[in-house]
Image: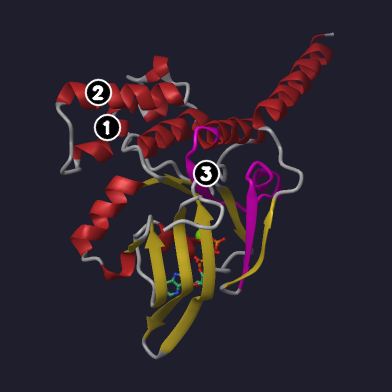
Amino acid sequence: METSNGKKPVVVLEDFWRTYRSGEVEVHAVRGVNLRVEEGEMVAIMGASGSGKSTLMNTLGCLDRPSRGRYLLDGVDVGRLSKDALSDVRNRRLGFVFQGFNLLSRTSAIENVELPMLYSPRCPPRAELRRCAEEALEQVGLKGRTQHHPSQLSGGQQQRVAIARALVNKPSLLLADEPTGNLDTRTSIEIMAIFQALNRKGMTIVMVTHELDIARYCLRQVVMRDGVVVADQPVADRLDADEELEKVLDEQAAIQLVAER
Ligand SMILES: Nc1ncnc2c1ncn2[C@@H]1O[C@H](COP(=O)(O)OP(=O)(O)OP(=O)(O)O)[C@@H](O)[C@H]1O
Ligand SMILES: [Mg+2]
């Protein structure tokens, strides 16, 4: 399936509803969303708390299914798949990054990165697995930290391990729910620099963020309110994370100089 501009849609949501039921009460967390994300896009999902962002992401991530409507991932109707087929799709096509990093604490960086492949039926031989994990860590600038445990790494470095783990299966879609939520400004920009570099190489990225500044590193912003999409537009004043990082470093150097006087 191709669109008129020749690009392949990675995500297609058609009249997507998700209703939670607890006893007699029904909560329509998402109500009839239509969304199309093409290959190579970088999309920020925004909106107030409770607007349905995580519910939407859970379906995009094949952790959940639509109550009504359809979700096509790379053209495959995910709602029709069995549980096993769904977890295979998740394993093969998707990478996840979470706010809280979700790393195993007693395990080295490289072992954390190897983990998703270890559990995959397509797990390569040991040496190949190590090579893939090393390559992923190198991509996020952590070549020299492969044997460190999470407690020996900064928050930003832990998030980079988590990004490497998300990349190791070579997914077609990278999903992130508040990836910079636990990080300071400078570290957040560093993470966005990695996302932008991946996106320049063609990776499709969908991320939830509360922060307007962070959304400005994306190419497109989708805003949700009460379970519906109320705005969907390109980012007019996109920020370049490498440039912003230089500015922050200059500022920090200037503050240092003043402090030393
Ligand atoms: N498992 C569940 N059972 C019942 N209701 C739920 C469940 N998960 C979410 N909801 C409800 O669905 C709505 C959307 O929740 P969701 O977690 O998607 O919001 P969100 O936009 O991610 O919010 P936040 O910014 O706080 O993370 C909320 O009203 C929430 O209370
Ligand atoms: Mg949420």
Distance between mark 2 and mark 3 Cα atoms: 28 Å
Residue 75 x/y as whole percent: 37, 59
Left or right of 78? Residue 69 is right
Task: Say if residue 106 shows up in the picture.
Answer: no
Give me the C-alpha separation between circle 2 and circle 1: 7 Å
Q: Nearer the viewer, mark 1 or mark 3?
A: 3
**Which residue does the numbered mark 2 point to in the structure image?**
130
Question: Quick check: 146 above or below 159?
Answer: above
- Residue 91 coordinates in the image, percent (x, y): 28, 47
The label shown at residue 114 is 1
Identify which amino acid the numbered label 1 is placed on. Glu
Mark 3 highlights which residue?
40
Q: Nearer the viewer, residue 106 or 102?
A: 102
Q: Residues within 10 Å of mark 1 (few under 14, many from 20)?
A: many
Label 1 CB less than 8 angstroms from ligand 2? no
Of pointers 1 and 3, the one earlier in the residue sequence: 3
**Tag 3 secondary structure:** loop
Q: Is residue 219 left or right of residue 259?
A: left
- Which range is magenta? 200-225
Q: Secondary structure at mark 2?
A: helix
Q: How many marks are shown on the rendered structure?
A: 3
The amino acid on which the numbered mark 3 sits, given as a three-letter code, is: Gly
Which quarter of the rendering shows the N terminus?
A: bottom left
Callout 3 crowding tier (Cα within 10 Å): few <14, some 14–19, many ≥20: many
Q: Is residue 216 visible?
A: yes
Mark pair 1, 3: CA separation: 25 Å
